[in-house]
Image (cartoon, rainbow, N blue to C red):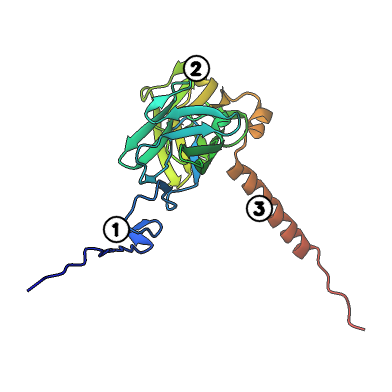
């Protein structure tokens, strides 16, 4: 018996992968290396607060032997290539973890706002863009710039920080340049009232003449705000009126409304019917 074998046989195996693999958004491929591609689920808009650290993510799948670079678009400055930094500003560095290349910017400044490009050295080159916005918190002391109080009274100075994504690590108070401590009738507190607003309160009990002077609220990594405190021993009543707070002003308005209402009833005569 003679056996005849046909060796011209071709076996083709095609593996098809759907649009997602283990939750990763990608593209279909046939089991072959198709080159690098970006994970489009990573954020393209980042908001950072002045003085904090910003993290711009870039996730690259199937990178192979290609390189990843970060470029600042406003001046086309190459910041990093792979794990190496190419800028003298030490605030910039890249953090690599698996397939994620994160550009870290320490102690963010206003001028850091803008577009950043994550680039892969493929042919043609591939780019993923991240826009960074920088939020600058505002610091102010509630009320007038001059505060007038009677000697022996208790004073509350309120410092409000708005547009703050993160609560300040601390709020220091200064009296004429010297640090205020919680002694001699002075007490400080900090309260986070909303997601972007913090209030620092300085309480001074039984005020004396020596408590007069400039008081400065200085949150960490933010601008400061100041107020002048005048402790009076019964003199200058006009100045006391000038230092009226918002609550006293509201009482003044309501007193006048009540007076107008009272006078309108006292001097009201009904007209005779015709």
Could you tell me which residue is drawn at 42 percent across and 24 percent down? 85
Residue 2 image-quadrant placement? bottom left
38, 142: nearer the viewer: 38
Q: Nearer the viewer, residue 29 or 82?
A: 29
Label 3 sits on residue: 254
Contact, CB < 8 Å: mark 1 with mark 3?
no
Residue 92 visible from this viewpoint: yes
Judging depth in this view, the residue of 93 and 63 nearest the camera is 63
**11, 65: nearer the viewer:** 11
Residue at the image position 60 percent from the left and 39 percent from the top: 245
Query: Residue sitting at 39 percent across and 31 percent down?
Result: 82
Q: Real-space Cα distance between discs 3 and 2?
A: 35 Å
**Element carrying mark 3:** helix
Q: Between label 1 and label 2, give the one nearer the viewer.
A: 1
Q: What's the mark number on residue 210?
A: 2
Task: Check the image and report above or below for 43 versus 273.
Answer: above
- Residue designated by label 1: 22
User: In the image as oriented, which residue stretches furthest toward the left?
Assistant: 1
Q: Position of residue 210 (x, y in %)?
A: 49, 17
């Amino acid at each position: 018996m003679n056996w005849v074998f046909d060796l011209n046989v071709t076996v083709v195996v095609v593996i098809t992968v759907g649009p997602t693999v283990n939750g990763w958004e990608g593209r279909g491929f046939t089991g072959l290396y198709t080159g690098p591609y970006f994970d489009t689920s990573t954020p393209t808009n980042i908001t950072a607060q002045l003085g904090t650290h910003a993290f711009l993510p870039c996730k690259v799948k199937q990178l192979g032997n290609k390189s990843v670079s970060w470029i600042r678009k406003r001046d086309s400055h190459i910041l990093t290539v792979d794990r190496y930094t190419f800028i003298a500003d030490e605030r910039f560095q890249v953090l690599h973890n698996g397939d994620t290349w994160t550009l870290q910017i320490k102690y963010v400044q206003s001028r850091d706002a803008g577009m950043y490009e994550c680039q892969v050295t493929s042919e043609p080159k591939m780019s993923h863009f991240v826009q960074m916005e920088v939020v600058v918190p505002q610091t102010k002391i509630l009320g007038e710039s001059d505060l007038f109080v009677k000697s022996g009274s208790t004073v509350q100075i309120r410092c409000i920080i708005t547009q703050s994504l993160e609560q300040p690590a601390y709020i220091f108070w200064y009296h004429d340049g010297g640090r205020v401590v919680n002694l001699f009738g002075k007490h400080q507190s900090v309260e986070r009232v909303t997601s972007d607003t913090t209030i620092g309160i300085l309480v001074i009990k039984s005020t004396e003449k020596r408590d007069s002077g400039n008081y400065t609220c200085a949150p960490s990594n933010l601008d400061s705000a100041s107020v002048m405190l005048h402790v009076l021993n019964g003199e200058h009543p006009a100045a006391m009126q000038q230092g009226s707070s918002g609550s006293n002003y509201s009482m003044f308005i309501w007193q006048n409304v009540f007076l107008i209402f009272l006078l309108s009833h006292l001097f009201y005569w009904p007209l005779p019917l015709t």
